[in-house]
Amino acid sequence: MANLPKTAKPADNDTALKPEVVKPKLPPMFKVLLLNDDYTPMEFVVECIERFFNKSREQATQIMLKVHTEGIAVCGVYPQDIAETKMNQVLSFANEQQHPLQCAVEPA
Ligand code: TYC
């Protein structure tokens, strides 16, 4: 800057050379929740969590017990389309087996 002649326009050069900052935009995330009820067997809930949320039997059991004792728990957090697909998979599977298990999606 100090050696530029008075007539030079350093701002033009600065703009041309400025490196572009690329900020990856992450999608909004959604929680998939399981709700407690008095009728769905614990084993069936564990099976759902293992199958649709890719959890180990131990993780699935902990999540099921959280729902059972606290009324609700998060099974996973995903972009909206994936969260809704998982919710629908749980609801279809529960319906097929005639269990009243409820599942919901909400913004994380
Ligand atoms: N409360 C159920 C029972 O005692 C078990 C259960 C757990 C049901 C989690 C739903 O999302 C649920 N059989």
Image (tube, helix red, strand yellow):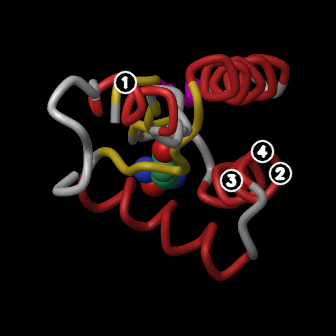
Question: Looking at the picture, does residue 34 appear above or below residue 27?
Answer: below
Image location (x, y in percent) of residue 63: 49, 64
Q: Are marks 4 and 3 in contact (CB under 8 Å)?
A: yes
Query: Which kind of residue does numbered mark 4 sit on?
Result: Phe
Residue 53 among magenta residues: no
Query: Which kind of residue does numbered mark 1 sit on?
Result: Glu
Q: Are marks 2 and 3 in contact (CB under 8 Å)?
A: yes
In the image, the residue with mark 2 has its CB under 8 Å from the nearest atom of ligand 1: no
Secondary structure mainly formed by the magenta segment: strand
Query: Which kind of residue does numbered mark 3 sit on?
Result: Ile
Crowdedness of circle 1 by 10 Å Cα count: few (<14), some, many (20+)? few
Mark 1–mark 4 Cα distance, whole angstroms, equals 17 Å
Question: Looking at the picture, does residue 42 appear above or below residue 71?
Answer: below
Q: Which of marks 3 and 1 is nearer the N terminus?
A: 3
Q: Mark 1 points at which residue?
A: 106
Q: Mark 2 points at which residue?
A: 51
In the image, the residue with mark 3 has its CB under 8 Å from the nearest atom of ligand 1: no
Q: Mark 4 points at which residue?
A: 52
Magenta-highlighted residues: 100-104
Which residue sits at x=46%, y=23%? 104
Mark 4–mark 2 Cα distance, whole angstroms, equals 4 Å
Q: Of helix, strand and loop, which one carries label 3?
A: helix
Which residue sits at x=40%, y=37%? 35
Q: Are marks 4 and 2 in contact (CB under 8 Å)?
A: yes
Q: Mark 3 points at which residue?
A: 49
